[in-house]
Amino acid sequence: MSNIPESGRTRRVTIRLVVLQILVLSLLATLGGRLWYLQIRNGSEYIAKASSNHIREVIDPAVRGEILDADGRVLAGNQTKLVVSVSRTSLLQQKDHGRAALTRLAQVLGMAPKDVEDKVRLCDAKTPQPCWNGSPYQPIPVTDQATTQQAMQIMERDEDFPGVSAQPTALRQYPGPDGANAAQVLGYLSPVTDDEVSKTAKKTGRDKYLPSDQIGRAGLESVYDNDLRGTSGVTRLEVDNLGRVIGNAGGNPAQPGDNVVTSIDARVQKVTEDNLLQAMADARTQWDKDTEKNYVADSGAAVVMDVHTGRIVAMASAPSYDPNLWVGGISARDYANLTSQASNYPLLDRAIQGQSAPGSTFKVVSTSAAAQAGYPLDGHYPCPTSLTIGGREFKNFEGESFGDISLEKALEISCDTVFYGLAYNEWQKDGGIRPKNPNDWFFKTAHEFGLGARTGIDLPGEVTGRVPDRQWKQAFYDANKDAWCKQAAGGGTDFATQIARENCVDGNVMRAGDMVNYAIGQGDTLVTPVQMARIYSALANGGTLYRPSVAKAVVTPSGQLVRNIAPHADGKLPDDDKTLQYIDEATAGVITSGTAAWKFTGAGWPQDKIQLHAKTGTAEVYGKQTTSWLATYSKDYAVIMTISQGGTGSGGSGDAVRRIYQALYGVDDKGNIDAGKALLPSPQADLPKFNPDGTAILKTASYSIDLPPSVGTPSAPARTAGYADLVAVEPTRAGGVRSHGRSRA
């Protein structure tokens, strides 16, 4: 008899059917729950997302604000040009990834196909310039030099140029009026990267980057980018499933950036730039008897500062470059030139990034240190031909001997041996090579003068310089001991190996030679031109150390004040009024009867009407020709100039600095003063006034200066070539670890 049920199903089959029913019901329940979640609970969210699939955003870049000089002249503005751009997204949708379209585009634009392809490729660690470092979804500019005829060809044959557009676009334009370059001060722009866009995705307004944005990468363009950039507009277009526009979904209009008013005077800037170049050109015609060849004069810098505020009136750096090279994308050739040793790195702002030994311009610091250490200002100190210290002879420049003289006279004639003696006495008082609680007046005073630290100027990339005090010496020894000892073990007899041998043993010890070298601005001391401008401004204004600044205010495109950028006093010099007056009289003597007299009063400067003060410096640099330094001030301005491998302080820079003062105060070569020809007899404190349309109401006229044809003011393309001949390596630390060179006046 059979045990099979009438239904014909076994127990096992029944269980399987039940499990299958449960699975089916579970799947139906899950599906129902998911449908409820999508359509009811989060329905509105997904409806919005679905709608957004039919919205396309068109970005309208904001017009970037202008950078203005103190009188309202445009230093960095905008110019409308026809820009041809390519969409990578559209190219990649072509079968050949757009190669044929780019070839046709190159033919129309008169460019090589490879140049066009290089412009639209994406940058990465292995791809050299030119390449696109912005968003891959943003149209990539190929040229901003398209003609109307070329643009019409592209627009009329759009089927041959998929993803290619040609439209008027506001582009940055440099330089400003009157031929002023100011490239390192102004900076340049480049496209925002995907990473930068991502990092600001949750921000709003000007703090948020859009893929179309160009942002400041150097100079004022970088520091005040948020003010200048504005807010891009967005137009939202409704499209169908074929991408055709069927309506407008609204949007936000672009908000132009604000303008930055600077303390730069475009006319003084040009005068400063031209005279720096002229001084370098003149130096190359002068014979250097030490190296038996003409001076190289490979680089230089100059600063004109308002002594009562710390504001920069002019700041020049050479070699320089044309910032227009960056507009619309920089070429491979230009980028290689700007970043190569052959061009001597013109992107560097040597006014804030060029470090060198200050030579005798440092002696105002040493004079202050001597006064603080208790040496009487009315005392007399020996100025022999040389001093022998630690078995080495330290000479005066060209072996002069002046007997016992005052500190004032020592500054006036730049007597090295007076300062050697003072520094050596203090070194002995502090315990020599075995110091016990040293006073370190000479090091302490340098720090009080603001050296060894950034000034805080509103420009990026400023360096600190160096005060080679005991702390620095120990840190430097710890970092280099192994290398010194390895070099010493090689058994060489050259100068560098001798120094390495000494430093291997006691390179962390402050030796007498280190101290006396330091007192005359040699050895391991490093300063920047802007640091020296700040110091000499403080000497001029009664001792206040102002923070250097370039920007004065931010204003709207119509000229309304957004915010004022007031001068900032960071501290005071350690000198009392008596010491400041003493240094003031000594530095005036440098002009009338000292080391700079032949370039000023001897050349007709009216010292009785416009009193100038100066200190010359000629810093010796191991393996190079001497560096020219000239630090000066009047009641209104400090003017500093330095030229690497440019000769003596007054010989290399004297004529140029005098001509800058002549332009400022309207002084001719015979010493006559014509107020009508004075560019800026006193710094401009007020902000410029603006017309209703935002253009400035200029208070001052334009200015041109007559210089030899070899310098002049070339056109923008020629300017780059003109500056490229200033070739040498980047300024380096002067004197080496054990340099005992002389500091010449």
Image (tube, rainbow, N blue to C red):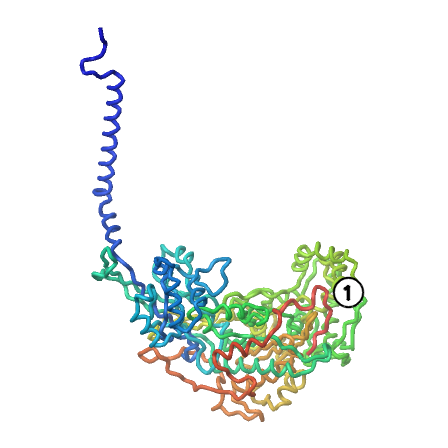
120 relative position to 506: left or right:
left
Residue lying furthest top = 1
Res 572 → quadrant: bottom right
Q: Is 9 on the left-hand or right-hand side of 328?
A: left
Quarter residue 100 falls in:
bottom left
Q: Which of 183 and 248 is in front in this view?
A: 248
Q: Which residue in the structure is indicated by mark 1?
A: 494
Residue 351 coordinates in the image, percent (x, y):
55, 72
**Residue 739 percent coordinates (x, y):** 72, 67
Placement of 49 over or under 79, stated as above or below: above
Residue 73 position in % (x across, y down): 41, 80
What amino acid type is highlighted by mark number 1?
Asp
Q: Residue at 67% of width from left, 76% of height from top?
A: 618
Where is the C terminus found, in terms of image quarters?
Answer: bottom right
**Left or right position of 253 against 577:** left
Picture quarter with the N terminus:
top left
* Residue 530 sits in quarter: bottom right
Please identify the residue farthest to the right as the structure is shown.
Answer: 391
Q: Which residue is drawn at 22% across and 48% down?
A: 44
What secondary structure is marked by label 1? loop
- Can residue 208 be seen here? The reply is no
Closest to the observer, 378 or 297: 297
Residue 339 image offset from top left, x and y in percent: 54, 67
